[in-house]
Structure formats: structure tokens, C-alpha cells
Amino acid sequence: MPTNGGSALIRALELEGVEVIFGLPGGAILPVYDPIIDSPIRHILVRHEQGAGHMAEGFAHATGRPGVAMVTSGPAATNIVTPLCDAYMDSVPMVVITGQVPTPAIGTDAFQECDTVGITRSVTKHNELVTRAEDIPLVIRQAFHIATTGRPGPVLVDIPKDIVDPVNPRSALEWYWPTDDEVASSLPGYRPTTAGQADQVRAAAELILSARKPVIYAGGGILKARAAAALRELAELTGIHVVTTLMARGGFPDDHPLCLGMPGMHGNYTAVTAMQSADLLIALGSRFDDRVTGKVDAFAPEARIIHVDVDPAEIGKVRRPDVPIVGDCRVVIEELVTAVRDLSGGDVAAAQPDRTEWRSTISGWQERYPLVYEQSTEGDLLKPQYVLEQLRDRAPEDCIVASGVGQHQMWTSQYWRFNHPYTWVNSGGLGTMGFSVPAAIGAKVGRPDRMVWAVDGDGCFQMTAQELVTAATERIPVKVAILNNAYLGMVRQWQEMFYDERYSEVYLSPDLPDYVKWSEAMGCVAMRVESPEEVGPAIDKANEIDDRPVVLEFRTDSSEKVFPMVPAGRSNSDIVVDPSQPPPGGLR
Amino acid sequence: MNLPPPPGPPPRHHVLSVLVENRAGVLARVASLFARRGYNIFSLAVAPTHDDRFSRLTVVVDVESAPLEQVVKQLNKLVNVLEISELDPRDSVERELVLLTVTADGDRRQEVLGLVERFEGRVLDDGADEVTVSVEDHPSRLDDLEELLRPFGIVGIQRTGRVALPRLESGGPV
């Protein structure tokens, strides 16, 4: 069947199961936008291309399916570099299509030309400049295959205008749809590993059965591999406690007795200290990020390491494991469960050392060092943690929450109760301020049945707030809670603690902009909340609104800091707890 | 007068033989990966193989700049990279080509030509006061040649970077 590149591209996206594209048209991509009118694919018109990218990420986080964004050449392509890098760091499956100037103009500094594949090379799992219309179906299939298999990640496809423009003879092609085998054989260098090596799995099971102080260090790979159920089975079978990193929140239920919560720079005392004191760390889909390990040389000094990851390059990158296992987290965990059962002859508890003392040490830490803050009372400044607790308690349990980056992100991770996978949408690796509003919109588009809250800071909100216009126009009823402390709060915290309270360029003003007027102007319902007794009623009111976006601006105490904290570059043993708690005297 | 590589201190670099898809942009992917991860490329040679769907790169990586394991693993993640092998200098044959323009005037001309002959080189271009020669040998021998010619005055030099293949099982240097 004869067709043209533009129609073939949209057809290919339909056949890949794409239901939604986040994007914004422009000169070079115009011919691809024309067939969208006749396609069942929903297009969501964003106000800035960065928004399209983060929406695609939010969609992917919430659904597990690849998010798709489409933008034009030049400045549109450069505007989407941040979301690409964000998705690359957090292994988010995403396909981005960019327009490009016509092939004869490439390299001439044409209007809105930039070297998109060159610029995005180091922030994509793969990218491709397509130069012939007949390659479009295959390249699109390859893009989805690469984005969603192995360690997921963003793939960019750059499409010159002449090969998609029906008036140009170069756009003509005979339609075809490559088979899975044709896709695989067209990528001879791409062969992700799935199953773990049997002898390594057995060696890991032996270590697990002999450990006295084991901790499961669950990372974002648990969610990417859809391994939450398998993880729970392994933890319950062995009775081993689980920490869930910032990227893994929800991968193991926070209300589970074996859950220790988030480790790392702002992790809770027990999660940090249990890892630090462990004799075995079972790292599942985690990458020993510096925000988790603190000073690497001093991290978990007595622990042997089992490291399971689908990306061989993660293994040994930061810490050399005793048992390396390359494979898909779900597959390998299931293999581990079987191996543990087999090796223990059925009675797993009897086959393991007595861990009573370890368990009581852990519960001692939990009792001694819970997360704390001083409650707000009537007339006081609002405590951000109180706002989070109220948001959490008044939202349905399966509510999806997205956050920006900074103090509010850490408080959200600390105070929310993530009992279900795919309820937490955040920017972990890159730490992209402004992530939450567009990401929440993408998540809501992917899961319209769920309530979606974006918890944002005032600094973050000002970076991407314009996407609330998109949400209002497209009737995407997300809810946004701005924790307005009038500062770039995390920077302020560091300046207070590590720069002698010299507050350099960190003050934002609580009143400028007027967040309520601004939000109303963007088509949202907006409310300002200034005292503790108003918090609950305002949230309840917001939760009842389901036909447009809502913004709640909470005026919060700017002096509040995130604790615990492991100062950057220090050992996790140097963890600083809330000033109201007794300072820990080293380990144990 | 082909000589086996001289024994000496352990090599300061790793030699990687990388089989890649022969298509636009692949070299840039490899090069920018090295740059992005902070690995230094000592030399790099690339050309299509006997199967023109593929090219072979011989990359010499500075040992100091990166743990080899990470370099290899990161390279392997590139979708267009098919196969990577480290070539141990003791188990591989290595060659490099150099073009040199050297000052060779008056009495010194015979000395220069004598050296070139010792290295089985050829004179490619003969000027009044300069000669351009080509020499193909083990890279460390080319280093020696360069040292020997330096006093005469090297006007221009272009080395190709090393190329290498694994030694055959029962083979030896020829």
C-alpha cells in the first residue's frame, strides 16, 4: 500500500499501542501533525516542550507503558533535552519524536536547525536520525523495543521534514510493518539479559540463608521490572527487612512490618543505619547512588553484597559485589525464591541463623528515632510535614503523588505512605525542579481513574506552572499543593547548615507571584491556606473537585529543615537526626 | 627485519577491538561515550571489515583514566556495538603506520635514509632539504624511530593509531 512518511509515522505509533501523544507542533514537524487529526491517538497540546517530556515521563511512571512526546526541530528539541536526561537517569521508557529540517538543508544552519541527535546522544538510551521515508516503520518499532526492554530509557527519533511531507516525492513509501524477528535482527548489537546465571543465583541464596543481619536494598528496578509481588514473596519467605530507595517507593508497602522505608541522605534513621550495620545487602535493581551510599568507602563496611541488575554496567560501578547477577529483577527474584526454598529443604526459617537480636536492634532504632517534627498549633506557622500528613490521610490509598525536587520532595517521600506500586512519580537521578506539575498531568492522563496530587515547592512551581493551562484546557483534573516557604528551601537548608547562614540568592518572596490569582488565571480553582486549622477543610474541598485542576497554596514555615540528614560527602554513620532527638552515639 | 615487540614495562594502555555496525554516527557515539565518562582515548583506528555491514575499531584506552571493565560495559550498552574484546599485547599482533617529513639536507640525508631503511621504511616524497617517508611497524618501534629522527628535525608527522588482531593459536610473529 503506497503511503507517505507522515501517515506512516502516525500509523506506526497507533500499531505500537500509543493512545496519547504529548506535544507541540512547529515548522519541521507540521506534516506529521496533519494526519493526527484523523488518528484515534489523543494529542495533548502542551505550553512548553519541557512539559511534553515530563508528561510523557509521568505517564510512563504511572502506567509502565512508554510515554510519547512529539515536538518540532531546533528550540523545541533543545527544550526537551531536560526530560530526556531525566528519563535517562531514572530509566523511564519514553519515545520522543522531533522534527528536523529537510535532509538537503541539514548542516547548513537552516532556520530552527540543530544537531538534535548530537545534542541528545548522551542523554538517550538510543537515538536515530531517519533519512529515508521507507525506514520510518522499522525505526519506530526499534525505538519502542529499545525504550521498553532491558533497562528502560528514552529513545529519540529525529525526522526530517522532506521524508514526511506528502508533497515531497521523498516521502513516498510502500507501507509495511516489521515483525518482531525483523526488529531483533535489525539490532544485532542489542541483546538484553533477562534470566540470572543459575550458579550465581544459588550462591546468592546461600549467602541469604547464612546472613545474620541482612537487608534488602530495593531500587527503582523493582518497579521497572514489575517485581513488587516477587519482592514481597522473597522478603516474607526469608523475613528480611526491606529499604525502598527514592525511586522504589511503593515497590514494597510502607505499612508492611518488614518495611524500613527510605534510606539515603534524607532517609530515616533506621533504614540508613540498618544498611550501614548489615552483614549482607541484597541490592535489587538499585545502583548505589551517592545519595544512598554517602561516602562510598564508609558505606555498609561489613556487608557482603548481592547485586541484581538488568544493566551489567551497574554491577561493580560503585561497589564490587560478592555475588553479581545480571538479569531482570522479577525473573531473578523469582529464581532466588525458588533457590532459597530448595536449599533450605522447605523450612526457610529453620535454615537461617537466629535473627532475633537483629530484629530487636532494628525495632529499637525505630522506637528511638522515628520521623519527628513539632506539630503546628492554631495560629502557628504551618509545618510542611503537617500539610503532607493531612494530604496523605485525606487522599484515597491508591492516590498517585508526584513531586518536584527539594525539601518538599523529601518530606513527601518521608511522610506519604506508599502501599502500592506506581503511586509515586518523581525525579530522582537528575533532580529536575519543575518536574511535578507536568509529570502529574501525564500520570493523570495515564490513570484517569486515580486521584493525582502534585506536591510542589514555590521555586519548582514557577518553572513549569504554565502546564496548568494545558491541564485546564484538556480537562485533566490534577491537584497541586504548593508548599510555599518563600525560599529555594533545600538550598537555604544547606546555606544555613554548611555556609554559616549566609543566604545567597535563595529568597523568593511568599507573595510574588500571587499563586492564587496566577492559578485562577490558568483556569484552576485555587485556595491559599495559612494556618493549621484551615488545612484539612481546604484539602477536602480540593479532593471533591474533579472537573478542573486545583491549586492549594500552603504558606509554610521557611525555617523548617529536612531531617535526618547525612551531610554530603560524609559517611552514613555520621547521620544527623532531628535536633529534638538525642544524637546517635555512632553505630548501635 | 621485523622484530618481536620489545620486552619492557607493562603497557600503559588497553587495546580494545570493537566490532560496530557500519553506519552514520557510530564513531561519534563511541567517541562521545568516552568523552562523557571521562575516559581518554590514546589512539583510534576505524575501517569497514570484510563484511561491509560492520566496521572494526581499534581503540587504545589510557589505563589511568578508567577501569577497563566500566569502559567495556558502557561501550556494550551502545545499541550499534556488537562485540568488544580486549587484546592483550602479548597475545595479539599490533601494527601502526607513520608518515614523517624530516629535514634531510646535505650530509645528514644519508643518515636519515639509513635509519628509514633500518626500519624498512619507504621514501614517498623527496624534496631538496626534506624527505617524507612511511614506516609500518609495531607502535613501540615507531616510538623508537621518532626518537631517532627527532634530532634531524621532524617537520610533519601523522600516525594512524594502532590496529590489532588476536594472535593465531599456533602462530607467532612473522
Image (cartoon, grey):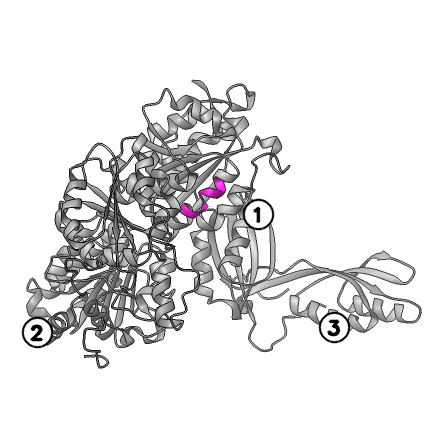
Secondary structure beneath dot 3 equals: helix
Q: Which residue is mark 3?
A: B147
State the separation of the CA atoms marked 2 and 3: 71 Å
The part of the image, by quadrant, that contains residue A471 is top left
Residue at 41% from the left image edge and 42% from the top image edge: A50
Q: Residues within 10 Å of mark 3 (few under 14, many from 20)?
A: few
Residue at 40% from the left image edge and 34% from the top image edge: A23
The image's mark for residue B49 is 1
Give the magenta range.
A77-83
- Dot 2 amino acid type: Thr
Foreground: disc 3 or disc 1:
3
* Label 3 close to label 1 by CB (< 8 Å): no
Secondary structure beneath dot 2 equals: helix
- Dot 3 falls on which chain? B
The residue most toward the front is A379
Total marks placed: 3
Foreground: disc 1 or disc 2:
2
Left of A70 or right of it: where is A276? left
Is residue B157 shown in magenta? no
Residue at 76% from the left image edge and 64% from the top image edge: B120
- Dot 3 amino acid type: Glu
Depth check, front residue: A480 or A305 = A480
| Type of secondary structure dominating the magenta stretch | helix
Q: Which residue is mark 2?
A: A356
Left of A287 or right of it: where is B50? right
Image coordinates for residue A7, horizontal then vertical, percent: 43, 23
Q: Sequence-wise, which precedes: disc 3 or disc 1?
A: 1
Q: Residues within 10 Å of mark 1 (few under 14, many from 20)?
A: some
Foreground: disc 2 or disc 3:
2
Marks 2 and 3 on same chain: no
